[in-house]
Amino acid sequence: MSGSSSSSSSSSSSSHDPSDPTDPSDHGDPSDPSDHGKPAPPARGRKLRPVGGYRHLRSFQVTTLIYDGTVAFCERFIDGRSRTHDQMVQAARSGRQNIAEGNRAGGTSSKSELHLTNVARASLEELLLDFEDYLRQRRLPQWDKDSPEAKAIRAVGWHRNDPSDLSDPADPTTTGDYARRDLYATWLDHENPAIRANALLCLIHQANYLLDQQIIAMEQDFIEGGGYSEQLAAARIAQRNKDRSDRTDRTEQNFPACPLCGKIMALRTARQGKNQGSQFWGCTGYPDCKGATSLDPK
């Protein structure tokens, strides 16, 4: 099998940071130095589901590498007129774009966020099979997950523990898209299609692992805190209870108490009898309590 990843999932275990009400993804592309230093837009009272920052997700960064690498691979080694060419490029694109779309959709729908993240995961699985097919059908070697080549690619994903130690691999999560791509150029720009395909398989396994962790975290968040709809419903119930409490307070101030049981009286209209059509105060405990007084007691 291709190399799977043991990369840390801490930066991707959740698609949003509840502690950050702003959206880093709206502040420009972190790969573009001209965007650095721009002030973050102010939060606008969004309380229930802050989202965004998908550009800083490791899963999004890896799928960007996969998308760009797949486009270059197909342009070089797959007939542009073939259906396989289009399917591989679209699968790679879907894996990337659905992470971003799902992350944004999470602001209003947990169900949509989970669905789109699963679509991204499924698209990458399809692409993984396409690369495996390419190697198998041409009798080209496929790297074992513990092969030196696979381990070398995984090593690029390690985070540098000591920034002052330049012998450590660069941290790909803190570089821009171009610099991050350069870290994998040895494999992704190789003349040998087998090396390119195997490198992309390793990256797909990494992305799949990271997306699996995101999905697990989303499901756990949903179980523990409920989705957006559940939180919105809870907020509405709380507001209704508050409004009802306010109305009760006003009622207790303006409406008289029942002379029999002491409960609040309600304004009622007689339906029959000699006083039919006239209003009176009736106990809100009716029919258990039949206390009543005239509207204007003399």
Image: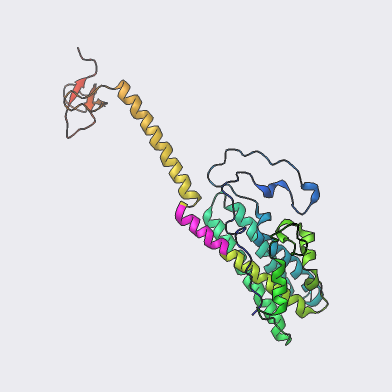
User: Relative to 90, does residue 103 appear above or below in the rendering?
Assistant: above
Tell me where residue 282 appears, x and y as whole percent.
22, 26
Work out which residue is located at the far top of the displayed protein and give it. 298
| Residue that extends furthest to the right in the rendered view of this protein | 191
Seen from the viewer's position, the closer of residues 8 and 274 is 8
* Of residues 288 and 68, the one drawn nearer to the viewer in this rendering: 68
Residue 37 sits in which quadrant? top right
* Quarter of the image with the C terminus in it: top left
**Which segment is the magenta one?**
213-224
Count up the numbered dots.
0
Extreme-bottom residue of the structure: 139
Q: Is residue 238 left or right of residue 291?
A: right
Closer to the camera, 297 or 205? 205
**Residue at figure coordinates x 43%, y 44% from the top left:** 234
Q: Quadrant of residue 2?
A: bottom right
223 is within the stretch colored magenta:
yes
Residue 112 visible in image: yes
Quarter placement of the N terminus: bottom right
- In the rendered image, residue 169 lying in the magenta stretch gets the answer no
Residue occupying image coordinates x 81% and y 47%: 34
Q: Is residue 151 left or right of residue 215?
A: right
Task: Return the x and y of residue 192 as percentages of the image width and height.
Answer: 81, 79
Q: Can I make out residue 82 in this image?
A: no
- Which secondary structure is most common in the magenta stretch? helix
x then y, percent, for residue 162 = 71, 58
Task: From the top left corner, tell me how far across and down residue 133 is, in percent.
Answer: 68, 81
Colouring mode (rainbow / by chain / secondary structure / one colour): rainbow
The picture quadrant where one finds residue 75 is bottom right
